[in-house]
């Protein structure tokens, strides 16, 4: 009788562990999955770009601050950044490769718009991704520039 009880206890533990793992995986996917319905309009000079906003607490808090017109500073020949006055809730992770057109948060208050693809060891929290970033690098140029973010 004891082996049967031990066997059933093991099965229950395995089932509980599998349920917890399933929820963790689903939760992490949902944190960065695109909402599909919320678009961010990004204007640089006379150029307009549309980005799909990620579904996470950071993006939700960022959207509440919009519209926002800021002077973004050039950095490293691949990104523009701006230090926000307030911290946003961050859930940073290593992306490995940053894609052109990604809008991310570095730390808890540095907004970063990437215009070139490159490998990185830094951690970022994803906010949005420009749907068609092909003209982004040319629009942003190599100097500091004014960028407007608003909900579409």
Image: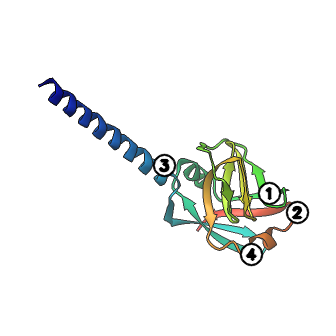
- Which dot, 4 or 1, sits closer to the camera? 4
- Which dot, 3 or 1, sits closer to the camera? 3
Q: In the figure, residue 108 lies in which quadrant? A: top right
- Which dot, 3 or 4, sits closer to the camera? 3
- Per the image, the residue denoted by label 2 is 143
CA gap between label 3 and label 2 equals 36 Å
CA gap between label 1 and label 2 equals 9 Å
Disc nearer the start of the sequence (3/1): 3
Specify the quadrant that holds the C terminus: bottom right
Which mark is on residue 135? Answer: 4
Numbered disc 2: secondary structure: loop
In the displayed structure, 123 sits above or below 14; it is: below
In the foreground, 86 or 75:
75
- Per the image, the residue denoted by label 3 is 28
Disc nearer the start of the sequence (1/2): 1
> Residue drawn at (69%, 71%), measured in percent from left and top?
133
Which mark is on residue 72? Answer: 1
Q: Is residue 7 left or right of residue 94?
A: left
CB atoms of marks 3 and 1 within 8 Å: no
In the displayed structure, 50 sits above or below 67; it is: below
CB atoms of marks 4 and 2 within 8 Å: no
Disc nearer the start of the sequence (4/1): 1
CA gap between label 4 and label 2 equals 16 Å
Q: Position of residue 146 (x, y in %)?
A: 80, 62
Disc nearer the start of the sequence (3/2): 3
Q: Is residue 6 left or right of residue 44?
A: left
């Amino acid at each position: 009788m004891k082996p049967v009880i031990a066997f059933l206890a093991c099965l229950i533990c395995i089932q509980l562990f599998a349920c917890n793992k399933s929820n963790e995986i689903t939760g992490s996917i949902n944190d960065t999955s695109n909402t599909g319905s919320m678009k961010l309009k990004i204007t640089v000079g006379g150029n307009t770009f549309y980005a799909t906003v990620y579904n996470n607490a950071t993006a939700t808090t960022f959207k509440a601050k919009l519209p926002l017109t800021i002077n973004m500073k050039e950095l490293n020949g691949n990104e523009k950044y701006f230090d926000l006055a307030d911290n946003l809730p961050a859930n940073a992770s290593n992306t490995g490769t940053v894609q052109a057109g990604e809008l991310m948060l570095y730390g808890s208050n540095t907004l970063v718009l990437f215009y070139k693809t490159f490998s990185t060891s830094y951690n970022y929290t994803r906010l949005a991704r420009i749907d068609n970033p092909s003209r982004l690098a040319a629009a942003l140029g190599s100097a500091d520039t004014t960028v407007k973010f608003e909900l579409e």
